[in-house]
Amino acid sequence: MPAPYSYDLRQKVIDAIELDGMPKTEASQVFHVSRNTINLWLQRKAQTGDFLPKPHHRPGNNHKITDWEKFKAFAQEHGDKTAAQMAELWDDDISPRTISRALKKIGFTRKKTYGYQERDEQQREEFMAQIEQMKPEEVVYLDEAGMNS
């Protein structure tokens, strides 16, 4: 977006029209400002008492995580979960990507967990009990990492 006209130029144009009685068309030609712009400045002065440019907010992030101490404690408690799972557990509506960026910002690193997340300990114990009841010659071990095809 282009920068607004300077305040001193606005002041000169308005003074020329109001104090010197210069017609708007002539002022627009002298100051190289469109007549519509002059009308908008005069309208704004009538409404607000001044002809300052409207404030424009620059686009940017509205940070969803503001309490960093709370987030650090949250990361320590739930650091074993994925970013998507952490996003669901966080108080506000937040995306997994925001969680990832925040974790990076606080310097939180995660190691990969190679264990199966949904492993059932009871099923493992039952399976181990079944294997113990079998004869050693009935048990076959497969090492898939070393197979040739």
Image (cartoon, helix red, strand yellow):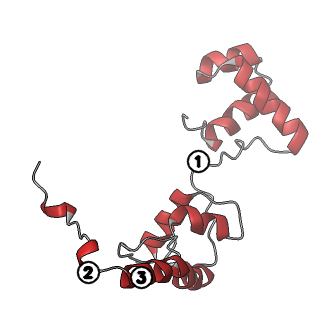
In terms of secondary structure, where does tag 1 sit? loop
Image position, residue 41 (x, y; %)? 76, 32
Q: Which residue is mark 2?
A: 136
The residue lying toward the viewer, choosing from 103 and 50, is 103
Residue in the image at 86% along x and 45% along y: 49
Q: Which residue is mark 3?
A: 128
Name the N-terminal-most of marks 3 and 2. Answer: 3
Q: For the residues labelled 1 and 3, say whether their Cβ atoms are less than 8 Å apart.
A: no
Q: Is residue 90 above or below residue 48?
A: below
Asked if one can make out residue 20 in the rendered structure from this viewpoint, the answer is no
Residue in the image at 62% along x and 15% along y: 29
Q: Which residue is mark 1?
A: 59
Image position, residue 130 (x, y; %)? 43, 79
Q: For the residues labelled 2 and 1, say whether their Cβ atoms are less than 8 Å apart.
A: no
Image position, residue 69 (x, y; %)? 59, 85
Q: Amino acid at mark 1?
A: Pro
Asked if one can make out residue 4 in the rendered structure from this viewpoint, the answer is yes
Q: Is residue 51 above or below residue 43?
A: below
Residue in the image at 65% along x and 64% along y: 88
Residue 20 is drawn in which quadrant? top right
Question: On residue 138, which mark appears?
Answer: none
Q: Amino acid at mark 2?
A: Pro
- Badge 1 crowding class, 10 Å Cα cut-off, few under 14, some 14 to 19, many 20 or more, is few
The residue lying toward the viewer, choosing from 85 and 147, is 147
Q: Is residue 108 above or below residue 52?
A: below
In terms of secondary structure, where does tag 2 sit? helix
